[in-house]
Amino acid sequence: MPSPDAVVIDANGVDSLITSLRAQGFRVMGPVVANGAIVHREIRAAKQLPVGWHDEQEPGSYRLSHGDDGEMFGWAVGPESFKQSVFPSRSVLWRARRDGQDLAVEATGDDVAPEAFFGARPCEVAALKVLGGVLAGAASPDPVFTRRRETAFVVTVECGRPAATCFCTSMGSGPGAAADFDLALTELAGPSGRFLVRVGSERGAAVLAGVASRPATAEDHRARDEVLGHAVAAISRTLDAEAAPGLLARNLEHPRWDDVAGRCLACGNCTLVCPTCFCAAVEETTDLAGTVEETRRWDTCFDLAHSYLHGGSVRVSTRSRYRQWMTHKLSTWVDQFGNSGCVGCGRCITWCPAGIDITEECAAIAASDGAVKTSEPTAVRDR
């Protein structure tokens, strides 16, 4: 790291930071208010940030409210994550065109400008690392993800107002940021527009060098500790991440799966808002001119067709599809990639129309762990 020292900038410094990133060729993607939610859009100035906006989240509920406190980052997370920047919801893998009797196959490339992820929460930074273990850590790394992630500039903002659905403390992903960022900001309490900035990379230091700042004092560091301390105290949901893999593996026939299946709509909302879900489908389309495209798009394990093999789908029941999602996220992901697939952002709880809570489901199974025994084959029952 170029320098262990932190600095403090004001609201004008945030604006200068955005300007500096744009000057270096980055397309700055940051939080804005649109369609009743905080989402990621290209920004050119700090005035576009959701100043004074706060979110109120509960299972199956999301609302925005506005105050006059002047906070730029007084909210948790919205329905969108930066996954869509590194793993786009739809991308063309290759294209072929007929030229007389010949067929020319062309690579489609991925020439989008490098992006700066401005305002990424620590849980989102953790999610990018989890996705990297899947898509970039494979024997054949995904070229789109790899290029976009390697060129991305990450400006994380530590969380001072977690939502009621957050459980990042259980997953070790927040509310503070420890690594995997270029710059880390903390919006300090007290005088409005004061941010403590830590440097996480050489290019982060280079960008920050063009921004007016002052050295951080011991008081500034104490203010950061207070912000994070209040955030930790505000998080009420918990999940035993260490025990979850074994717990779920032992309880594949637990009656709780029937209970949740009676509430689950199999809509796939949880997978669409999740910052780590990577299920995708590949499809080919043709037109009358003889052009063929192979396209990859996001998919969900809640879709009946997602597990289709010759003769039918493997997971016919909602019970089996919810169980597949939850056990993969918290259990078999560890077997595959060495870490949990959940970062505790709480999006799956907030954006579930039925208000299903993954932490409650896990706790309900744990409450009677070992009490349910069956010899009936899972695959047979689910079909």
Image (cartoon, rainbow, N blue to C red):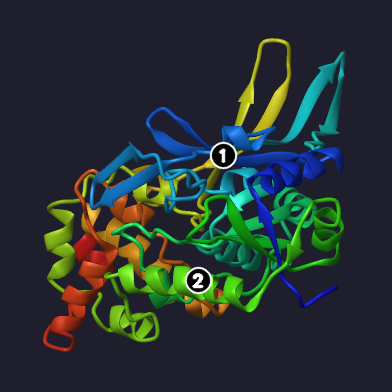
Q: Which mark is residue 188?
A: none
| Residue 301 locus on image (x, y percent) | 40, 52
Please tell me whether mark 2 sits on a helix, a strand or a loop. Answer: loop
Query: Which is more toward the observer, 250 or 25?
Result: 25
Residue 47 horizontal side relative to residue 363, left or right:
right
Report the quarter where the N terminus lies: bottom right
| Neighbour tally class for label 2: few under 14, some 14-19, many 20 plus, Cα within 10 Å | many
| Neighbour tally class for label 1: few under 14, some 14-19, many 20 plus, Cα within 10 Å | some
Residue 102 location, quadrant: top right
Q: Is residue 300 visible?
A: no
Residue that numbered label 1 is attached to? 89
Question: Which residue is rendered at x = 58% and y = 32% of the image?
Answer: 48
Question: Furthest-top residue in view?
Answer: 288
Residue that numbered label 2 is attached to? 173
Residue type at numbered disc 2: Ser
Question: Which residue is rendered at x = 86% and y = 43% of the image?
Answer: 24
**Circles 2 and 1: CB atoms closer than 8 Å:** no
Residue 345 location, quadrant: bottom left
| Residue 126 locus on image (x, y percent) | 56, 66
How many numbered dots are placed on residues in this image? 2
Question: Which residue is rendered at x = 51% and y = 58% of the image?
Answer: 276
Residue 178 horizontal side relative to residue 59, left or right:
right
Residue type at numbered disc 1: Ser
Residue 24 horizontal side relative to residue 158, left or right:
right
Report the quarter where the C terminus lies: bottom left
Question: Furthest-bottom residue in view?
Answer: 370
Give the alpha-carbon distance from disc 2 to disc 1, as whole Å: 24 Å
Q: Is residue 222 above or below residue 38?
A: below
Residue 167 location, quadrant: bottom left
